């Protein structure tokens, strides 16, 4: 078997080739160490892009995920005196429990040192219910306008609750009225406070 051909190469050419090989080896090693740090967007290989489908599936809205501040509240048990209609209406709207045996208490949501009749976390919605207050407006109780001061306290409650909620977006507050006249009486103030409301018999 013939031996390898000996081709004479000028000394300077051999040195140039050796230097080029050394630079190439150094570049390859540096690329391995950097692990693609210097790559540009879109340079990801097909295998890499297929390996992480969840990264691409995430929505990029540019907005951080907003938490619901009232989630930091807690359920409390409150006593308001015996009023079957009010407790039943509150429970029907909010889904919160009440004393079905003696009508002594109802569960409510306390947040920012303020009580609300209900809370729906998934909607970040605080709730307040008002039962049959129309009896003080429609003449059912003669002279009630002279002694009943419940609407004054109702307005103060709306202002307190509405102020708390407006300071903590995206929280919302909705008032539910069992009767229409009371809703009508309160609707302008609630709208000014940014509080949602509806008549829900």
Image (cartoon, rainbow, N blue to C red):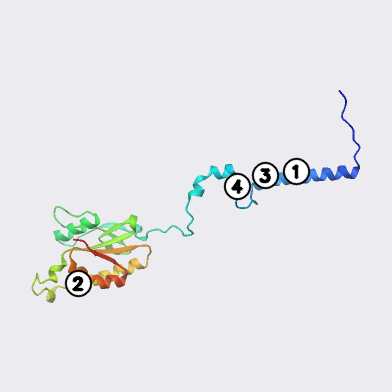
**Residue 65 left/right relative to 94:** right
Instruction: Tell me the distance, in whole angstroms, between the alpha carbons under discs 1 and 2.
Output: 86 Å
Task: Answer yes or no: is residue 124 visible.
Answer: yes
Foreground mark, 1 or 4? Answer: 4
Residue at image point 18% right, 59% down: 89
Sequence-first tag of 3 and 4 = 3
C-alpha separation, residue under disc 1 versus residue under disc 3? 11 Å
* Quadrant of the image occupied by residue 45: top right
Q: Earlier in the sequence, mark 1 or mark 3?
A: 1
Give the residue at x 17% y 61%.
Answer: 86
Q: Secondary structure at mark 1?
A: helix
Label 2 and label 4: CA atoms lie apart by 66 Å
- Picture coordinates of residue 175 (x, y %)? 25, 64
Identify the residue at image location x=63%, y=52%: 40
Callouts 2 and 3 close, C-beta under 8 Å: no
Instruction: Look at the image and tell me whether residue 153 can be seen.
Output: no
Neighbourhood count class around disc 1 (C-alpha, 10 Å): few under 14, some 14–19, many 20 upward:
few
Closest to the camera, between mark 2 and mark 4, is: 4
Q: Which mark is residue 44?
A: 4
- Where is mark 1, residue-wise? 25
Query: Residue, x 83% and y 43% (percent of image)?
Result: 17
Decide which of tag 2 and tag 3 comes sooner along the chain: 3
- Mark 3 lies on residue: 32
Q: Secondary structure at mark 2?
A: helix
Query: Which circle's residue, 1 or 4, is located before the other in the chain?
Result: 1
Q: Is residue 141 above or below residue 20?
A: below
Measure the C-alpha gap from mark 1 to mark 4.
23 Å
Which residue bears the numbered disc 2? Answer: 151
């Amino acid at each position: 078997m013939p031996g390898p051909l000996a081709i004479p190469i000028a000394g300077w050419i051999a040195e140039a080739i050796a230097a080029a090989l050394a630079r190439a080896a150094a570049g390859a090693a540096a690329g391995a160490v950097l692990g693609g740090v210097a790559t540009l967007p879109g340079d990801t290989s097909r295998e890499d892009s297929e390996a992480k489908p969840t990264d691409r599936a995430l929505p990029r809205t540019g907005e951080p995920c907003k938490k619901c501040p009232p989630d930091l509240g807690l359920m409390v048990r409150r006593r308001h005196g015996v009023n079957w209609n009010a407790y039943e209406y509150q429970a029907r709207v909010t889904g919160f429990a009440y004393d079905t045996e003696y009508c002594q208490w109802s569960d409510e949501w306390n947040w920012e040192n303020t009580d609300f009749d209900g809370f729906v976390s998934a909607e970040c919605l605080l709730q307040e219910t008002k039962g049959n207050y129309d009896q003080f407006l429609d003449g059912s109780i003669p002279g009630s306008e002279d002694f009943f001061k419940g609407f004054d306290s109702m307005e103060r409650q709306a202002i307190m609750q509405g102020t708390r909620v407006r300071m903590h977006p995206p929280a919302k507050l909705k008032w539910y009225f069992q009767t229409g006249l009371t809703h009508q009486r309160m609707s302008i103030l609630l709208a000014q406070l940014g509080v949602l409301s509806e008549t829900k018999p």
